[in-house]
Image (spheres, rainbow, N blue to C red):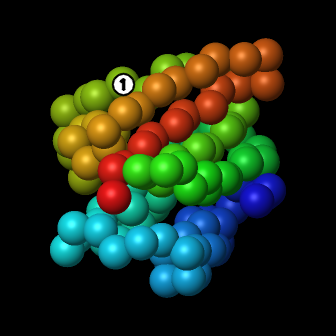
Amino acid sequence: MNFDGAQGCIAAARDATSALLKDQVPPGHPTFHDDVLLVVSELVTNAVRHAPGPLIFRLTLLRDRIEITVQDTDHRTPAPRPPDLDGGRGWPIIQSLACDVQVFLHPEGKTVSAQLAW
C-alpha cells in the first residue's frame, strides 16, 4: 500500500492489518493480533514522524510468521533513545515483539522489516 505520509495513514495501515488478520491468519498466541497491530502502528508512526513524504507499507504472510515492511524516505537507521513526552518508546517495543527486525538502506531512504511468529 502506498501512503502519502500524513497522519491518517497510521489508522489505514492498522485497518488493513486487522482485515488481513481476521480473514487470512491462523490463530496465534492470545496477544498475536494486538502485537501485530502495535508493531504496525509503531513502524508507520515512525515513518510519518521522521521521514518526509510518501511511504510504502506491506504485509507478507510467510509459513510461520507475518512480515511487516515499511519503506520511507529517511536515510537514518532507527535507534533507541531515552523516552520522553515526544516518544522514544516505539523502537524498543518493535524489537521486543518481533522475532526478527532488519533495516535496509537504499538510495530512496530505508526499509524496515519486522517479523512476528504465529
Inspect this view and state whether residue 48 appears: no
Tell me the element at label 1.
loop
Q: Is residue 62 left or right of residue 57?
A: left
Compared to residue 79, the image places residue 32 above or below, namely below
Q: Residue 55 at what x, y percent from top left?
A: 72, 47
Residue at the limit of the structure toward the front, as seen here: 63
Residue 110 position within the rendered picture, expressed as x and y whole percent measured from the top left: 64, 27
Task: Quarter of the image for the C terminus: give it.
Answer: bottom left
Along the line of sight, which residue is nearer the eye, 96 or 21?
21
Residue 95 percent across, percent down from the top left: 29, 37
Residue, x 41% and y 32% (percent of image)? 101
Dividing the image into 4 quarters, which one contains the N terminus? bottom right
Percent of width and height locating residue 97: 26, 48
Residue that carries the numbered disc 1 in the rendered image: 79
Q: Horizontal placement of 88 versus 71: left or right?
A: left
* 99 relative position to 54: left or right: left
Q: Is residue 64 visible?
A: yes
Residue type (three-letter) at the residue carrying disc 1: Ala
Q: Quadrant of residue 23?
A: bottom right
Q: Residue at x 49, y 83 (%)?
A: 22
* Disc 1: CA contacts within 10 A as few (<14), some (14-19) or many (>=20): few
Residue nearest the viewer, comparing 61 with 15:
61
For residue 79, side relative to residue 13 (left or right): left
Q: Residue at x 61, y 52 (%)?
A: 60
Q: Is residue 18 above or below residue 98?
A: below
Q: How many marks?
A: 1
100 or 55, nearer to the observer: 100
